[in-house]
Image (tube, rainbow, N blue to C red):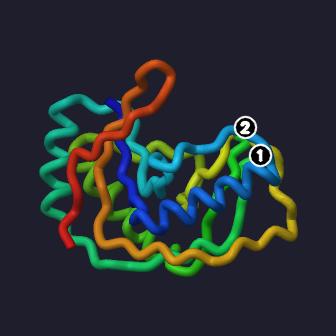
Amino acid sequence: MRLFFALWPEPTLREQLAALRREARRRCGGHATPPEQLHLTLAFLGEATSAQADALAASTRALALAPGTWTLSRIGHFPRAGVVWAGGDAGAEALAALHERLAALAAGAGLSVRSPGPFTPHVTLLRRAGTPPADWRPTPLDWHYRDAALVASTSRHGTHEYVTLARTRH
């Protein structure tokens, strides 16, 4: 199974992100992320054994997380992957610190973070999309979070399914 740590938006924020995703698709084309899969990946860990997943789930449940807020205020683009994303700097330092804590937790289970570069907190809105207009400034969205989730990703019939294995304490 493939594991990652994530923040999941509350229903109201999910609706706001889905609306932003629709606007992004109108402006950039591409393939939209399904609303139920909109999330912030805090740390992608890749393939794991059942024993590693069980150990990490136990550690995740024991980890206390302080509530926080991240403000999504800009649209970005990863050109090589054709990914259009929403992100922001307000609250990003706390997310970077959480990323490091979760990486250390994963290391305790024999796993490491798989990342092509430095941690950039973002929500993927589109894949295989064009470049967003340079002057596009979305209405800022505040993402209030209280816990992080350890998630298993499986692929079935060409679609990804996400299953939450454990959540941090708050």
Nearest-to-viewer mark from 1 and 2: 2
> Could you tell whether 30 is left or right of 152 in the image?
right
Q: Which amino acid type is shown beneath numbered disc 1? A: Pro
**Residue at position x 47%, y 73% in the image:** 143
Asked whether residue 80 appears in the rendered view, the answer is no
**Residue at position x 13%, y 51% in the image:** 58
Residue 56: image location, x then y, percent = 20, 47
**Mark 2 highlights which residue?**
128
Give the answer, above or below, for where 79 lies relative to 123: above
Q: Residues within 10 Å of mark 1 (few under 14, many from 20)?
A: few
- In the rendered structure, find residue 13 and report the number of the disc placed on it: none
Look at the image and tell me in which quarter the N terminus lies: top left
Q: Which amino acid type is shown beneath numbered disc 2? A: Arg
> Could you tell whether 147 is left or right of 24 in the image?
left
Location of residue 136 (image quadrant): bottom right
Location of residue 145 (image quadrant): bottom left
Residue 99: image location, x then y, percent = 40, 62
Number of marks: 2
Look at the image and tell me in which quarter the C terminus lies: bottom left
Under tag 2, what secondary structure?
A: loop
Alpha carbon of mark 1 to alpha carbon of mark 2: how far?
9 Å
Q: Residues within 10 Å of mark 2 (few under 14, many from 20)?
A: some
Under tag 1, what secondary structure?
A: loop
Residue 4: image location, x then y, percent = 37, 46
**Mark 1 highlights which residue?**
79
Give the answer, above or below, for where 25 lies relative to 14: above
Location of residue 87 (image quadrant): bottom right
